[in-house]
Amino acid sequence: MRVPLSWLKDYVEFDDTPGNLAERLTFSGTEVEAVETVGGEYPGLVAAEVLESKPHPHAPGLTVCRVNSGTATLQVVCGAPEVLPGHCYAYAPPGTALPDGTAVATRTLKGIDSHGMLLAEDELGLSPDHSTLLDLGPASPGTPLAEILGPPETVFHLEITPNRPDCLSIIGIAREVAALYGTELRLPGFDLTESARAVEDAVRVSVADPSDCPRYTARVVENVRIRPAPLQMRRRLALCGIRPINNIVDVTNYVLLECGQPLHAFDLELLEGRRLAVRRAGTREAITTLDGEQRDLPAGILTICDDSGPVAVAGVMGGANSQIRSATRTVVIESAFFAPALIRSAARALGLSTESSYRFERGVDPAGVEWASRRAAALIKDLAGGEILRGVLDIYPHPVGPRHVSCRWEAITNLLGVKAGPDEIAGRLAALGLEITERTPRGCTVSVPSRRRDIEREVDLAEEFARLHGLDRIPEPPPRSLVVPDADDTHTRATFALRARLVGLGLREVNNYSLVSPRLLDTFRADDPSSRIILPHPVSHDQSVLRTTLIPQMVVTLGRNHARQAAAHAALFEIGRTFSPGKEEDRLVLGLMGPAGRPPLDRRRAVTIPEMFLWLKGILEALLPANNPSRPWGLSPADIPFLTPGTAMQILVHGQSAGTAGILAPNIAAEWRFAGPVAVAEITLEPLLEDFRRIPSFSPPAQYPAIQRDVAVIVNESVKHEDVLRVIRAAAPKELASVELFDIFKGEAIGSGKKSMAYSLQYRSAQRTLTDEEANAFHAAVIEALRRELAAVVRES
Amino acid sequence: MKAVEIEQRQAAALEEIRAAADERSLDALRAKYLGRKGLVPALMKELKALPPEERPLAGRKANELKVAVQQALTERRRELAEARAHPAAAAASFDYSLPGVWRGTGSRHPISSIIERAVEIFHGLGFTVAEGPDIETEYYNFDALNTPPDHPSRDPQDTFYLSDGRLLRTQTSPVQIRYMEAHPPPVRIVAPGRCYRRDTPDATHSANFHQIEGLYVARGVSMADLKGTLAYFARRMMGPGVRVRFRPHFFPFTEPSVEVDFSCHACGGKGCRICKHSGWIEIAGAGMVDPNVFAAVGYDPDEYSGYAFGMGIERMAMILYGINDIRVFYENDIRFLEQFAQ
């Protein structure tokens, strides 16, 4: 909301700079977003009267005028839609400059000389309005503009929080300022001289359901004359962002800005049956609103109707069929309180937010409805003449009175952690217009006016006190530490430790959106499309499904880095959440591309699928250590559509499927034009965290020396490492301390289809030093088993 | 053999030893000089044949030769062993400037870094981490947090609703409710997590983002405690000179509510590009837990009070690291990620 400083000063006195005022407002809860200076000194600019105007002979839309600038009569060409002889406008003679610095000179427009310019508000820096010339009203030609427009205006741009609709007006802000500076609020005084004729004789009003419209008032002013409002009023409206229309409409907007109560003026003669009825729209009702839009009204929307149908969308915008025209003679002033929720849904349904709807949505002061009506009637009489009919139609079946709220001094100071005495607290509350109706040594009761719907409880009073007392006066004690017994976040700590291990392993963490494109998921065929959670109203199709797997976005991430040539190799991970109906599951995804596992001088050779696979497996082994016997895990070949057959693995933990791992299938990888194989793995987080929660149990390292024996077996290529291990372990005694594969060899020397695998075995007893003979016996048993079980040719050493 | 001759033999022996190319030659030289049939035992035998007046000098010289040869052998042996262990190190061709060989350095995503740092600070104050689901009910995300039924934040324009009426949480605050429902006071938790708002992505908006929520409920908790705690956090997180200030604000679930500014860590509050020349940066929303929230979880507001706060993780990361577009967090360009290896 915009608040011009000079207007604010009509209602409250204070002695401070605009900068300080802005700061005090901000730190008492009315945030000042900007302080703007509007207008200027206007050196050389004057009022000029148009003596004569006629269309430009060669340029439609331009007008050629003769103007009296006070010192001369000059010819000026002007592009405004309406230039009225006899009216005074702002005039910039040649040789002057506009406030934005534009120099004004004599120019030739389509063959006709223009000696200077007639100005619109935007050219004067008063508002963004360029639609019409600034009409100065009655002014003598040659009067300096600065004299007419006054000194430059300071305008505050305020952000009003939704709990404070009472601050959506100049008076509302003035009330805050008065409380801050300890000065008096001055409400505008006016006389309401009414005629003898009663308002009931002119118009009838009805409200179908008082819960839709708890209060509705109407006043009538007869014999008005429509003309422009005075310059000061028009200027104030413009400063607040409202375009001046005519004296009646301007008054309703002026009062809206002044006190926050939206008003509407109808031309009584245009109301069929001279009647206003507040009712919900039925089906198939329509209205042309003041902005010229023809609108079909959603059934149930709150409307104001005459006998023929809707004449206004209640609280949002009036209808063209009953609007104030230049011929209007009798005006009905509507001032009402509409149910906030109804106005909000109406504004949303019509896609139309207005100054009125904004205030009604947040809630106006039901007690202020009648004051605004009187104020508007008095101003209309002042500016448009005529007679105010006697009385007001006021449908207000359940008047809202002040609310009484009690507080305890100690509760307030304890909650805030400040020291303050009862007088200090009571004084702050009273300054806000909260009248103290009862006071005891322990606390007080205040009467809360109906405009402050936000004050209901003791804490609300604590807030009022705090913001006036000053939040900067709340001390900053050193934080207390507190142990909450049984509070347990080992899950988080384990996740942090897992992340630390991944980073230590040389992987980089990425973060992808939870929302993905269904097309991307379809590409991978990694999930069951029927168990996706689809957003009914996504922002875009690319972010319309909650991810069911982390793998596709990991591949996209690798692909993007590859395409951008950000890195030739990468080892990435993400810890993220996946979604399926009824289940949210945190998972880890790994992604490798390029020679990620190779040392720097060995990165030009093409990466093979087996080595890429083993890098991936190496990371998994570091996360799921084999030395945790309570949690066996392994890989089991599986049929996974997005992985290369043969490399596609299910990760089993405790025999349960916990994820997938393998090399990305070529047909999918092709989409990102990767240079070599890409490895991905996805595993549920829970089994990975176990290791970080487990408390290791110590077993003493063996004291006695070990004896090492090597064995090399020549086997068929189809024999796997795990087969050899199984045979060795089954044949060896408990003294077998470790088995390590240290070489694999293929070549003509051992024959095609064969490979040699060399193992180093360590034997060690926990009780004594083994003899060579014992070790030889153990080893012989192993060799015998290898020959027997794997048809291996054994070379021992 | 005369003393002079012995000296000559010693010099020749030492030269021979220093020139030995390998262990094998050293073994041979050892045998040649110190072995049973070597020079030293021979010299000792010869001593007896010398005239008595020459004997003491020759004896001393023979002993000197023995010690010198022993030392030279040991020294050369060490040299050879060293050369064997670091063949290139000794050579001029050794290039210490080649790229190192170990696995690459990994990195935390900056969002994780901020979360972990924040959590570590709050761990030190006795807070523990609580978590909650991303998919929430309207009850936990709005109703129980005292958000009126017609509050604009519930608008489907701003919140992602699912077809079953649930929603993607717009804030981490529902964790407060879930935790208080399950635990009696005192409560001292922080809740980092992912949140969602139906914003069109741009430099400062993203379909999902992260927050960290804090909640402390006990007897006698005051706004001063909130301020002291956030002031401590600000110094630990952003730097020792950073201060906090409160501005009154409005949130449905706290009363009084404040917005919390940190003084700019980059310029010390003098004004710079990062703080848009104001010296202050808005970091958090906070306040005293509204009694209606306590009512929703069955806490007695007359007995307990508490504070709550929420901070944007991306926002803190952007300010701390000088990042000006939120989208880079989700692009995962390695040249971005590698800058956060810590």
Image (cartoon, helix red, strand yellow):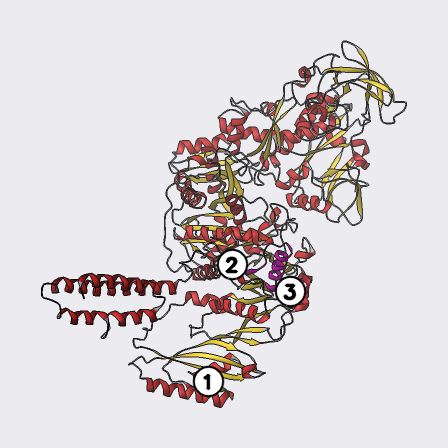
Screen quadrant of the N terminus of chain A: top right
The circle drawn on residue A95 is none
- The answer to the question of whether label 3 and label 2 lie on touching residues, with beta carbons closer than 8 A, is no
Residue A281 appears in the rendering: yes
Which of A469 and B84 lies nearest the eye of the viewer?
B84
* Between marks 1 and 3 in the image, the one whose residue lies nearer the viewer: 1
Q: Secondary structure at mark 3?
A: loop
Which residue is under mark 2? B132
Residue B67 in picture, x, y percent from top left: 21, 64
Which residue is under mark 1? A795
Chain letter of disc 2 in the image: B
* Between marks 3 and 2 in the image, the one whose residue lies nearer the viewer: 3
The circle drawn on residue A532 is 3
**Left or right: B7 in relation to A107:** left
**Left or right: B29 in relation to A549:** left
Chain letter of disc 3 in the image: A
